[in-house]
């Protein structure tokens, strides 16, 4: 028997919005410690890794480890049927081939349940090695999303250059060239609006806009985003999910460095 | 001479929005007692019946009974030209082949008139027999619209099951199965938010989503919707139009009962 | 060296929105006195004339007269990257083949620069003769935009008839006929909501809806629009741009007068 409850459906809707464009389907691995989803995106370029800790659910019971392959498009459709202030419960029997989403309104007068078939998906568990990154940047997630969207107008690639002073994102193409510089915040009054840089070594890396833009679908989950970068290893774009866990996106840098 | 005036154009706009997707055209029958529109939808499956009482208009004059065939798409376009707080007057001469819509702004400094050709439409007056329904359910119209929209994702049909305890709407298809249960409201504080069931006999009936969803275009007209059901007779979905009248939609249940 | 700065990017965005549908490209003529853009629209029917005075910029320097041919679609894309409260600076070297747009956030922690290639465009400077117009009408720009949009549903042409009492706009086609009358405002309390007519002689002129609707893209620039009309000469539709200048659209009347 598996059962996980959240008193507020909003966060689960936002999580689905953050992954459903990248992944058509995915396997949720459930255990005592929580729920894990790890998968390469549909075009096998970037990696999505979602972790939700069991102790932050309003109720969590997982008698036996369970791997539930789900169509994320269908799951997103089902979650759209929940009101934001509904309580949502995910339920599955051991060895079952279906999962049930139950939504209860606050006054308990509306109860909906949606049953979805599970899928058998190939699982490739990729070990992600611990890395000491040359640069770790935290910045407002809305700002990052805005810049990725703006620069995507100019090129398929964004060059990210990180120094002690700040971070510069650049794109250059037929329409012209664009540079956006964010200075490290000098006085951190409001942490969620700050740009904070922890740097061992300066890096300049090039990434595909398309994936960066897909990652920013997670923006509603967290006010801040964290970018971890080192030469020749994948960028990590991380959004915390309040006290529930986090979602991390990994994307290898492009080889041809068209630095500006 | 026919003349009917409403000090607020909003309600007429909402009425048109409630019928224009189902009906390309329709005949407005005008008499001393008011305005009536009755017509089968474009695909001849459901029936729309609109009644507006003369005594609730701000001015109403109808010297001779008049049947005005109108293109409802054009009428909707014309009504879109009215501001919500405009006074609207519908005017026609006896035996005329045009109708005029006049909109006046509150400060009387803007006056618009739109003249539209009338059409000769075949009229089939369907007698609707008085029926004692097994179940009559009143519920918030927004809730009903939401459920019909949600369930339409799962199937072309919705099964409505009504018991003393509440109403259950279900849909089942390739994506999975969905059940939404609304309990009868125990303490009716706000009547417009309540679910109220008057039941002689339990019913379980299947309806085409498509039409239910079309009926919910009337949602802005009224906070509550009333569903009247009996086995083997058409469902009636009724929206009151403040003190002006009502709009009723009739839809026969599907024969093949795929009850869940 | 050319440099022009505005502390608020909004106005420049609105100016681009007001011209980019009519003009794919245009030449900005810069001199000591300010910036001028004059061009026939893409289909060579109407004329757009934009004037921005140097003394209303927050900084303005123009060492030598400069004609910068720009792709207005690209320029609009670049300006979309500015936040509304960013300071925007337009910069170009003498004889340069690029122009740079620099956006600075209010806290100076975000600085973006966008460089765009300039174009060599044929320039046709049309002298616009001073005219004493038979009728000059000022009216709320939103009202004018609304009427043009409404009437466009009925015909490709709008007939504007201006008398001492007011202005009447009409359109007539297959769907029906429409007349919108605005009376001259009797008591001008709020100048921006008033309809004010200065008339030497009554005029009735016919114009293509399509262009009038394109002109109303300038509506966000100014609460009032001014229409200047005389028989057989182009209509002038003028929007003031706060204290910075104005944008004027010129459109010749249609010959076949289908007056209503």
Image: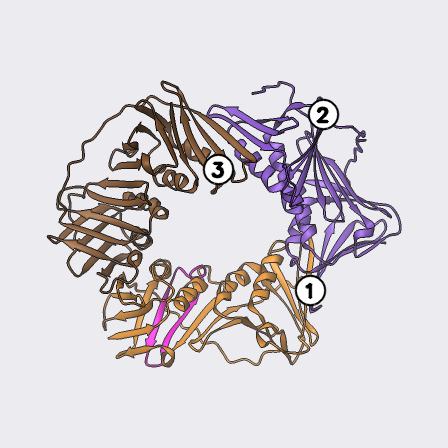
Chain colours: A orange, B brown, C purple
- Residue A82, position in %: x, y? 34, 62
Q: Same subunit under labels 3 and 2?
A: no
Q: Quadrant of the C terminus of chain B?
A: bottom left
Query: Residue C152: in sight, yes or no?
Result: no
A22 part of magenta stretch: yes
Q: Nearer the viewer, residue B147 or A259?
A: B147
Residue at x 30% of width, y 32% of height = B34
Separation of residues labelled 2 and 1 (CA atoms): 47 Å
**Residue A91: quarter of image:** bottom left
Q: Chain of mark 3?
A: B
Q: Nearer the viewer, residue C159 or A35?
A: C159
Separation of residues labelled 1 and 3 (CA atoms): 42 Å
Q: Is residue A153 above or below residue C200?
A: below
Q: Same subunit under labels 2 and 1?
A: yes
- Residue B49, position in %: x, y? 27, 36
Q: Considering only order in the chain, which callout, 1 or 2, is on the residue closer to the N terminus?
A: 1
Q: Residue under label 1, please give it.
A: C105
Query: Residue B128: in sight, yes or no?
Result: yes
Q: Nearer the viewer, residue A133 or B54?
A: B54
**Residue B95: quarter of image:** top left
Q: Is residue C20 above or below residue A96?
A: above
The secondary structure that most of the magenta stretch takes on is strand
Q: Of all residues shown, which one is farthest toward the front?
A: C187
Q: Please state the extent of the stretch shown in magenta in the rendering.
A: A20-41
In the drawing, what numbered circle is on residue C230?
2
Q: Is residue B97 above or below residue A245?
A: above
Q: Residue under label 3, please give it.
A: B82
C110 part of magenta stretch: no
Residue A69 appears left or right of C193:
left
Q: Same subunit under labels 1 and 3?
A: no
């Amino acid at each position: 028997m598996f059962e996980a409850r959240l008193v507020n459906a909003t966060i689960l809707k936002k999580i689905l919005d953050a992954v459903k464009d990248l992944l058509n389907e995915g396997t949720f691995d459930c255990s005592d410690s929580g729920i894990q989803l790890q998968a390469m995106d549909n075009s096998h370029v970037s990696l999505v890794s979602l972790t939700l800790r069991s102790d932050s659910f309003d109720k969590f019971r997982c008698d036996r480890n369970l791997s539930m392959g789900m169509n994320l498009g269908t799951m997103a459709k089902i979650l759209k049927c929940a009101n934001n202030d509904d309580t949502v419960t995910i339920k599955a029997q051991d060895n079952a081939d279906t999962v049930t989403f139950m939504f209860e309104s606050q006054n308990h007068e509306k109860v909906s349940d949606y049953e979805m078939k599970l899928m058998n998906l190939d699982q490739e568990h990729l070990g992600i090695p611990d890395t000491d990154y040359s640069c770790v940047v935290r910045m407002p997630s809305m700002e990052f999303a805005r810049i990725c969207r703006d620069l995507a107008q100019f090129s398929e690639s964004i060059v990210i250059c990180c120094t002690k002073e700040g971070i510069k994102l650049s794109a250059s193409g037929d329409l012209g060239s664009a540079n956006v510089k964010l200075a490290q915040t000098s006085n951190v009054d409001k942490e969620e609006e700050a740009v904070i840089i922890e740097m061992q070594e300066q890096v300049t890396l090039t990434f595909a806009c398309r994936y960066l833009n897909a990652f920013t679908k997670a923006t509603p989950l967290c006010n801040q985003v964290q970018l971890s970068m080192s030469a020749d290893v994948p960028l990590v774009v991380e959004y915390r999910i309040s006290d529930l866990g986090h979602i991390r996106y990994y994307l290898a840098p492009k080889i041809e460095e068209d630095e500006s």
